């Protein structure tokens, strides 16, 4: 699945969550609420990374928990990009191409 397909999937899943939120909370989450969801999941991801180094003991299968939480964090990012009208595929490509170019230039300067 590429980023375009992943974004479409993220949007469909977020739409389902919005239906649940409307039923239980009276309205769908805002972009700010989604950002808080991402921050919460990043916190959990941090603990799972600590667990990979023996610094925290999670309940459950660590590889599966880590895999799932990484996917959820990516989902939040794709959801936020979609809700904020950011073409994440273009942004990722442009940003990483620029970073790669700058790093290669830095390494070339260090080598000369």
Image: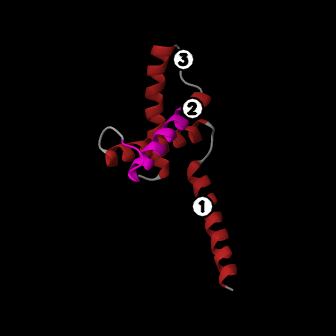
The label on residue 25 is none
Magenta span: chief secondary structure: helix
Q: Which residue is identified by label 1?
A: 96
Which residues are drawn in magenta?
36-57
Q: Secondary structure at mark 1?
A: helix
Q: Is residue 54 magenta?
A: yes
Tell me the residue at 38%/46% (across/down).
66
Which residue is nearer to you in this view: 89 or 29?
29
**Which x, y percent locates residue 75?**
47, 41
Tell me the residue at 45%/53% (across/down).
2
**Which label's residue is closer to the chain start, 3 or 1?**
3
Q: Which residue is identified by label 3?
A: 27
For the image, the number of numbered tags is 3
In this rendering, which labeled residue sits more in front, label 2 or label 1? 2
Q: Which residue is identified by label 2?
A: 36
User: Looking at the image, can residue 8 be seen?
Assistant: no
User: Looking at the image, can residue 43 be seen?
Assistant: yes
Tell me the residue at 44%/46% (across/down).
70
């Amino acid at each position: 699945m590429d980023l375009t397909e992943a974004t479409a999937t993220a949007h469909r899943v977020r739409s389902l969550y919005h239906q649940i939120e409307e039923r239980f909370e009276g309205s769908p989450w805002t972009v700010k609420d989604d950002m808080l969801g991402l921050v919460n999941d990043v916190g959990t991801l941090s603990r799972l990374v600590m667990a990979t180094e023996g610094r925290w003991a999670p309940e459950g299968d660590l590889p599966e928990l880590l895999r799932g939480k990484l996917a959820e964090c990516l989902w939040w990012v794709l959801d936020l990009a979609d809700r904020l009208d950011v073409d994440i595929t273009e942004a990722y490509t442009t940003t990483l191409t620029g970073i790669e170019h700058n790093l290669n230039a830095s390494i070339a300067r260090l080598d000369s």
